[in-house]
Amino acid sequence: QQTNECSKNKFTKVTVSVEEFKKNNYPHSSELFKVFRSTFGLRDFRPNQLEAINAAILGHDCFVLMPTGGGKSLCYQLPAVLSNGVTLVISPLKSLVIDQTEKLKSLDIPTAHLLGNMPHQEENIIFTKLCMAEPGLKMLYVTPEKIAASMKLGQILDNLYGRGKLARLVIDEAHCVSHWGHDFRPDYKRLGEFRKKYPNVPIMALTATATPRVRQDILHQLQISGTKLFLSSFNRPNLLYKVVPKKGKSVLAEIANDIKRKYEHQSGIIYCLSRKECDDTAAFMCEQGIKATSYHAGLVDTKRNDVQMKWITNKTNVVCATIAFGMGIDKPDVRFVFHYSLPKSIEGYYQESGRAGRDGKTSHCLLYYNYQDMHRIRKLIELDTSGTAESKKVHVQNLFRIVSYCENKADCRRTLQLNYFGETFNDNQCISNKETACDNCQNKASFKYIDVTEDSIEIVKTIKELCNSSSNWNNNFTLIHLIDIFKGSTNQKIKTNNHDKLSLHGRGKHWDRLDAERLMHKLVLEGYIKEEMVASKLDIINAFVRVGSQGEKLLQGSIKLKLALTSKNKLNIETISKNHFTMVNPVLKEIQERCYENLMEVCRGIAASLN
Ligand code: ADP
Ligand code: MG
Ligand code: ZN
């Protein structure tokens, strides 16, 4: 069994604050509830909100980890209203900054933002408000670049601090401080200096990043120790996760039909691998009468902004995009995120699919999977000249993890994702929600585990034999060829190479072809078989089968392998009822009765021979 690198993280050593701040009898409590209800117009706190707010008001440094849509903003906005002075909020994205400022103004909370390209006049109005004896602002949003670039702002912050009017520093999207994160911003790095400059000002960092390594790095980079940590579950209960086989050309037509049937006039994203795939997919969707556009790095900035705006304002419904799309876009009502090609890692998948359903309503995350897409991404990794051997290895590992996620038919999707991030999760929580239970939880009954150790040994032995053979056979064969041998195919390639004489030939002839494929994929993903990427002319890369690094161990017999298989659907004659007959005419009643009896007899016979 593979070990989960992330579950061995050091992160768990940081104490999580839960009960400590779960009180409602602090001196500030009555004011807090009043503002929560009347200013923000809300009724119930979401998990960890009240705790983080209390801790912040009591002056602690806080680190708030909540999934997207969990309600992080309130954790600093409410304390800002109750605090004496100005709360400085660092946020990496202009669009988010503008959104938040507008929203707070509409709630009558004096708020402003400073961005790179603002007219001096407007800036000066804000600076004047900040310099008032009692500052005319409760919250000031800035981008990290602005902090780094504006001397004037620096002076004003010094001045506020000197007067005890700098209430708190908030670092939203704090993962931007980490090199390990997906969105590193150099200017975030300098926020570490804040603590030295303004030692008495409490800091709150917030992020939806799920990886323990990034979380650890954030604490380190910001130099905040003794922090109160608020860690929520990263489960997104309103998202339905499903892996769909991607077979044949008709898949796109199915997707289009699905969109028209289930999500008419609703927003969604279809993630594609290449620019061309984005363009082609969007064109196809348009042909089918769906308002779709393509989005990728090949478009000029203005065009990209235009695509975004039209989508956000619901002038278009579906964006066919590379994974660059969606970062920092805060559209609440995205009803579906489809991956038309394989994501590059589990983390990537969690983030990308997580763009669905931020408003908490049921939304669908479908991953269209075939094994060949793995080869397409491996090819990109191999051809990437900027990558080191080490980084390529990590990329391939990440890729293998998401492929095993897709190949897995037995375990809960949520459990697979959350375990990857070091969180334990009980499947029952997934099954209990009928509308969003994942595909594997819904299909649980139709799978059973079988021992595949002997078959696997036989397969690896055969590979070893073929690769060592000195016959005119060229030793280069693909996984598909191997599956053909296992299934006992007698195609031309098998006959001319005498592979029908191998003892492996036909060993799996009773296997369902899909299951045989899954067995081979499992052997690749767990290192018993290796697919060597060999470049031939015209940058076509072939994947040839070799014995993998774990192959010898398997041959020595110290490993047991199990695979979840589709147990053949048993024919259950009890499910055939008289109601299946549609003849309602009373004259035909007798015939109907007799037909039913005859049918039952035939069914009993078939069932006996099958079961
Ligand atoms: P995050 O930053 O964690 O992704 P936001 O702070 O943007 O999430 O909040 C997501 C949505 O949830 C917003 O529309 C917000 O108004 C709403 N929200 C936050 N807290 C509550 C609450 N206690 N009750 C109801 N809605 C809330
Ligand atoms: Mg947020
Ligand atoms: Zn599940």
Image (cartoon, helix red, strand yellow):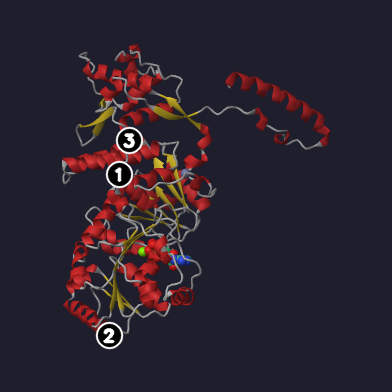
Using a 10 Å C-alpha cutoff, classify the residue at mark 1 as few (fewer than 14 neighbours), some (14 to 19) or many (20 or more). Answer: few
| Element assignment for label 2 | helix
Identify whether 366 is placed above or below 408.
Answer: below
Q: Badge 3 is on which residue? A: 2
Nearest the viewer among 447 and 372 is 447
| Element assignment for label 1 | helix
| Element assignment for label 3 | loop
Q: Residue at the location (51% across, 38% down)?
A: 443
Which of pointers 2 and 1 lies earlier in the amino acid sequence?
1
Nearest the viewer among 280 and 140 is 140
Q: Badge 2 is on which residue? A: 125
x%, y% of residue 480? Answer: 34, 26
x%, y% of residue 570? Answer: 58, 27
Q: Does the residue labelled 3 lie within 8 Å of ligand 3?
A: no
Which of pointers 3 and 2 lies earlier in the amino acid sequence?
3
The quadrant of the rendering that contains the N terminus is top left
Image side of residue 115 versus residue 66, left or right = left
Q: Badge 1 is on which residue? A: 8
Nearest the viewer among 607 and 54 is 54
Using a 10 Å C-alpha cutoff, classify the residue at mark 2 as few (fewer than 14 neighbours), some (14 to 19) or many (20 or more). Answer: few
Question: Between marks 3 and 1, how big is the CA–CA gap?
Answer: 13 Å
